Image (tube, rainbow, N blue to C red):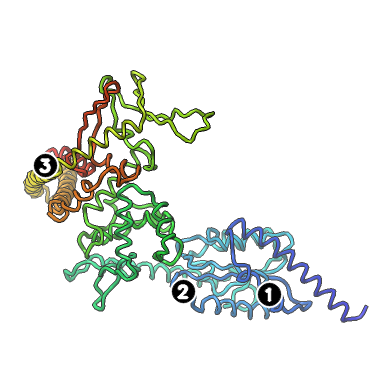
Amino acid sequence: MPKDSLKKDHQVSVIETILTLQDEFKGIILNIIGAFDKDQCFPPFKGIVLETNLKPAIGYIRYSDKKQDGNNSIIIQKRQIENKANQEGYYIILWCMDKAVSATHKDAINRPWMKVLFECASSEIFAGAIFFCEESRVSRQVKDFVRDAHDPLKEDKPTLKFFSTSEPGEWNPSKPHIQAKLLIYRDESAYKKDRTIRYQQSCLYPSDGQKPTRPGSQLPYGYAKDENGEVVIDNTENKADIVYLIHYLSSFGYSNKFIATLLEEGGIPSPKGKTWVASMIDKITQNLFYQGHLTWNVRQSRSNSARNEIDQIDLFQNNHKAIIPLHLAETVKQMKIFKNQYGRNMDTPFTLKNLLECKNCNAPLTSKNFTSGKSKSDIQKYVYRCANCKKFVAAEKVHDFVFKKIFEHLSKNSIVMKKEAVNMLKKWKKILRQKQDNVTKAIQHVKEQERFVVNVTTPEEMELANSIAFTHNRLSEKGSELEELSEKIEKLLNPSELDIIFMNFFDHTSNTLNDLELRSLSLFLIDKVELNLTTMNASIDYRITPFIDLEKWISHITADLAV
């Protein structure tokens, strides 16, 4: 057979092998990664030299910082790997790229594209090699890549080879100098981590008495730095106004998904130019930075994005100008509590759900849909029903009657209700001041006791010293909590804050609000509605202030202080 014909047959065989492998690889990638860019992963055939001595290989690329997106890191690593592969008689048929993935915080096998590499290299029909740049690309923990990827693959496929662009010939992790390099990269990462932590601490807890500054990280949407490096509100493209709108809508009970859809349909750019989604809204409404507070260590860990409890967060209050005033932040917080208590769907036809009580039985009224499944009418039969006497009444009838009574009361008594709310806030302030004085006296008493346990020698003295220290710490924490609550109440007593609060609650009629807004308003203003199901008379107990959670917290913290 002619040589040209043999060469052509070989090339066809090579292409068929590549296509078969890549088809299998696509299934593996879809299963692990999901949708992906095929052009980035699979090199075109025109870039492959189809020679008899070249074998297929997988190239692995990684960089750790999102700031490297768009720079030359991938191009440089690719070029080095391609050159090395060509020298060793291989060609790359698959690129596995872990972008902005830390090798310090993530074990090798837990990186998404390293998982792809492992599964693809395990394929029965793959008989090639794995290429990467120097050792820090695959590991900064010394043993993870060797233990979880290299050794299992070599045990299963002894002919499989590994190559590093920084090593001549085949890469062998058992060589002393390679082990030394892995240790050096680990220590380098530990040094960088320590240096970063020290820098963050110097920003958050400056030794020169200056106010804390946010370590070099991106500011939240709606903020920027001026020419002096100071944090200022950024309202370019109405960013700060959008943050306020998000909180305002959230305070009325609108869901994160609804707000995200509204912004997306309105053509409003998101913080990172992507599609608005519910998680973005949730992140914005939970971010204390918008209330003027600097926060750090908010997430539980790099791998767990759940928020820490407030007492575990580094919190620096009143650090910069707030976009969200206290009254709005408190109503958003209270609305989240309502949703956890009564259900997340506020857009319900039962706008007075959880607030109605049968006057004759002192039993709660439950909400029921009495519409027959066979009914051809679009009209729904919603009722409130007493769980005890079984009497029921149409929900629409209750709403018309009760809301008419509510809005008549608001229009006639808004000044009186505002005065009562102010008096209640002042009462809370007085109670907190008294408790603060008691705590201060108690701390002074504990300090006097500390003088007697300077030289601790016996177990009894040690137990006493520990008890005194515990009491001192507990009282100091309570003192800080009391101070924080006092500052909140002081801000709420600000006339401008009060005017906005009561304007939001009183400057409405039932005709201007939809069901969701009526339900939200009811939960904030009403404690209970006693309804006579026979005469349709109603007795409404109004809340003195809309700050229900604040009232509960004051009751809790003052009752907890046995001083």
Q: CA distance from mark 3 to mark 1?
A: 78 Å
For marks 2 and 1 on the same chain, the one whose residue lies earlier in the sequence? 1
Amino acid on which disc 2 is placed:
Gln
Q: Position of residue 516 (x, y in %)?
A: 35, 44
Q: Nearer the viewer, residue 485 or 274?
A: 274
Q: Going by the image, does 98 lie left or right of 265?
A: right
State the residue position of label 1.
Answer: 44
Q: Residues within 10 Å of mark 3 (few under 14, many from 20)?
A: few
State the residue position of label 2.
Answer: 68
SS of the residue under disc 3 = helix
SS of the residue under disc 2 = helix
Q: Nearer the viewer, residue 85 or 179?
A: 85
Which disc, if any, is residue 416?
Answer: 3
Q: Nearer the viewer, residue 348 or 286?
A: 348
- Asked if residue 452 is positioned above or below residue 302 in the image, the reply reads above
Q: Position of residue 125 (x, y in %)?
A: 74, 62
**For the point 29% across and 69% down, which residue is it?**
234
- Asked if residue 533 is positioned above or below residue 420 in the image, the reply reads above
**For the point 33% across and 27% down, which residue is it?**
365
Q: Going by the image, does 184 lie left or right of 310?
A: right
Residue contact between numbered discs 3 and 1, judged by CB atoms under 8 Å: no
Q: Position of residue 551 (x, y in %)?
A: 19, 41
Residue contact between numbered discs 2 and 3, judged by CB atoms under 8 Å: no
